[in-house]
């Protein structure tokens, strides 16, 4: 459901639905609470409500901060993995210039097939949270086959041959990391704490009494908006390859890899 929303709705629409929806429900809940219990406006229990609200807000804030920092770190790592994978591919193309013409052409063909498979086949699957190794397996096998098809004779070829073997092994490792990160999601317990905590914090604001209706609604709306924006951030960062704000395959179309597009 989360991935579907990210892939089918713009960031502006998600903001309107998430933040606007939470604020609207909070304001409606506050109005309904004061209509059913008008005595709350006297603020007789504000000391107790304030203490409870402060305690819950502190705990909830720590949980949300931990979740957001964790997800932000994972999103940065996902972008770094993609950058490293494309960099190793580009280095393979450069190193293969020292190979005999036939092997050089085979290597470039295999790298080209790999970049297209990643950007055109694997990436849409990653956006849906269902990546598959098979999309690039044939290209990987062709790269190894090219390296196994000849024996370097000169010292120059041997040096670049060793570098290419090292780079292709790194590509395979980064591919696994990229696919793993595309499948990762926030553990259910943290989702319950993040989203469920909002169901505790926001209703508590309804009980904080104030005779001014405008002040009450401003207080409730501000808290709801802050919670809404934070939950929106959690939703977006939880899936770094989905939605408008996501890691893109542009790195596979730049530098030495641009010739294949």
Image (spheres, rainbow, N blue to C red):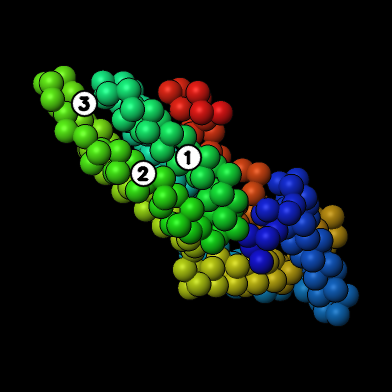
Question: In the figure, is residue 161 to the left or right of 45?
Answer: left
Q: Which marked residue is nearer to the observer: mark 3 or mark 2? A: 2
Q: To which residue does mark 1 refer?
A: 113
Mark 2 residue element: helix
Q: Residues within 10 Å of mark 2 (few under 14, many from 20)?
A: some
Which percent across, then down, holds residue 18? 72, 57
Front one among 48 and 94: 94
Q: Residues within 10 Å of mark 3 (few under 14, many from 20)?
A: some
Q: Quadrant of the C terminus?
A: top right
Q: State how far apart marks 3 and 2 are (Cα).
A: 18 Å
Q: Mark 3 vs mark 2: which is more N-terminal?
A: 2
Discs 2, 1 touching: Cβ within 8 Å: yes
Which circle marks residue 142 in the picture? 2
Question: In the figure, is residue 207 to the left or right of 101?
Answer: right
Image quarter for residue 149? Answer: top left
Residue drawn 13% across and 21% down?
154
Q: Is residue 150 visible?
A: yes
């Amino acid at each position: 459901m989360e991935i579907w929303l990210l892939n089918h709705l713009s960031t502006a629409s998600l903001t309107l639905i998430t933040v606007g929806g939470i604020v609207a429900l909070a304001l409606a809940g506050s109005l309904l609470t004061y209509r059913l219990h008008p005595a709350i406006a006297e603020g007789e229990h504000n000391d107790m409500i304030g203490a409870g609200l402060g305690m819950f807000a502190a705990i909830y804030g720590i949980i949300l901060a931990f979740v957001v920092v964790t997800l932000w770190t994972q999103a940065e790592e996902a972008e770094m993995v993609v950058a490293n994978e494309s960099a190793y591919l580009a280095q393979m193309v450069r190193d293969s210039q020292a190979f005999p013409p036939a092997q050089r052409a085979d290597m470039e063909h295999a790298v080209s097939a790999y970049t297209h498979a990643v950007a055109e086949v694997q990436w849409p699957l990653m956006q849906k949270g269902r990546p598959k190794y098979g999309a690039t397996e044939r290209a990987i096998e062709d790269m190894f086959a090219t390296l196994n098809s000849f024996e370097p004779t000169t010292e120059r070829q041997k040096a670049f041959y060793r570098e290419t073997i090292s780079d292709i092994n790194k590509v395979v490792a980064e591919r696994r990391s990229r696919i793993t990160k595309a499948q990762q999601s926030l553990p259910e317990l943290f989702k319950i704490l993040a989203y469920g905590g909002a169901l505790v914090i926001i209703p508590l604001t309804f009980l904080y009494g104030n005779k001014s209706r405008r002040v009450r609604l401003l207080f409730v709306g501000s808290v709801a908006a802050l919670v809404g924006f934070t939950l929106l951030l959690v939703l977006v960062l939880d899936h770094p390859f989905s939605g408008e704000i996501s890691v893109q395959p542009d790195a596979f179309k730049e530098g030495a890899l641009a010739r294949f597009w």
